[in-house]
Amino acid sequence: MRRSITERISVTADGAQSSTGGGGPSISGDGRFVAFTSTSTLIPGVTGGSNRVYIYDRQEKQVTDISPGYAYGPSIGAGDDPVGTLPNKDWRKRPKHANYNCEMREPSNKEKIKKFMESLGQRVKKQGRVYLTGGATAVLFDWRETTIDIDIKPVPESDEIFQAIAALKNELDLNIELASPGEFIPPLPGWEDRSIFIGDHGPIHFFHYDPYAQVLAKIERGHAQDQKDVAAMLSRGLIKRETLLRLFEAIRPELIRYPAIDAESFETKVKEVIQRG
């Protein structure tokens, strides 16, 4: 006889019980992600009171607010596309791990990421750059075996490359997310020069997005996997602590333009990472 286990998913970012319940749940096909609504403040800096929409990752034990611009109730079943209800101007606000229009495809390993780069280079004719970030960087540097999605920033953005990406995500069974650190924290001065060259495929030059920008974005978000990634980048010498502090200080005046970021808390977390030695 199988034992039933009840798990509460309407919890705060640190796992504490919410002050109110959640409603309107929708679970992904593999049971990993649960979308729900709640009036509680589940994430620091996000005000409750009104009904907000959250995604809870049962594997990583992380909760993400996807409420900005959200038009309808949550739904992340196979084939559903809650992100599609966002106004076009808000597409960059999609949370990490929320590429649900990819129908919860299997994670990508190094082989799949390399195949994606090769195939994208074969599909496009115009020269450009594609910056890989997040889990893709972690997999290619060998401190993670797989990533849920391949995060990229194409430069320049064009219909040609977007059409190629849309086709490849189905042909190669990939989750592809248009996301980079510069959409969540102020762009760091000189980030392009610090980006790490990966290789050329056709007319596309592939790079790892500036590791300093990646680390600062991960420090600000502060999820468990983010902390592991920061430690891995430090141990591999991809960043230097003194340079990290200097670059944070360079963008600190711009944090006023990012109301979701608590500048003092962000600064404290950066200094904690630097002082760990």
Image: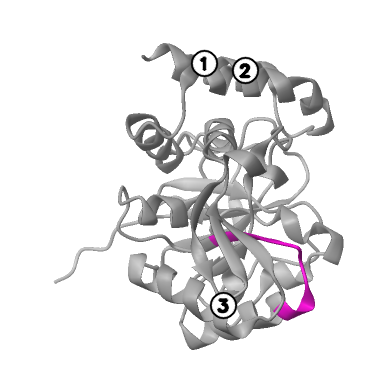
In the picture, the disc for residue 242 is 1
What amino acid does circle 1 point to?
Glu
x, y percent for residue 23:
62, 58
In the picture, the disc for residue 246 is 2
Task: Please count the marks in the image.
Answer: 3
What amino acid does circle 3 point to?
Leu
Local crowd at mark 1 within 10 Å, few (<14), some, or many (≥20)? few
Q: Which residues are magenta?
A: 151-160
Q: Who comes first in sequence, dot 3 or dot 2?
A: 3
Measure the C-alpha gap from mark 1 to mark 3. Answer: 37 Å
Q: Residue at x 61, y 75 (%)?
A: 101
Q: Element under label 2?
A: helix
What amino acid does circle 2 point to?
Arg
**Height in image: 225 above or below 166?**
above
x, y percent for residue 44:
63, 31
Badge 3 is on which residue? 120
The quarter of the picture where residue 246 lies is top right
The reply to whether discs 1 and 2 touch (Cβ–Cβ < 8 Å) is: yes
Q: Element under label 3?
A: helix
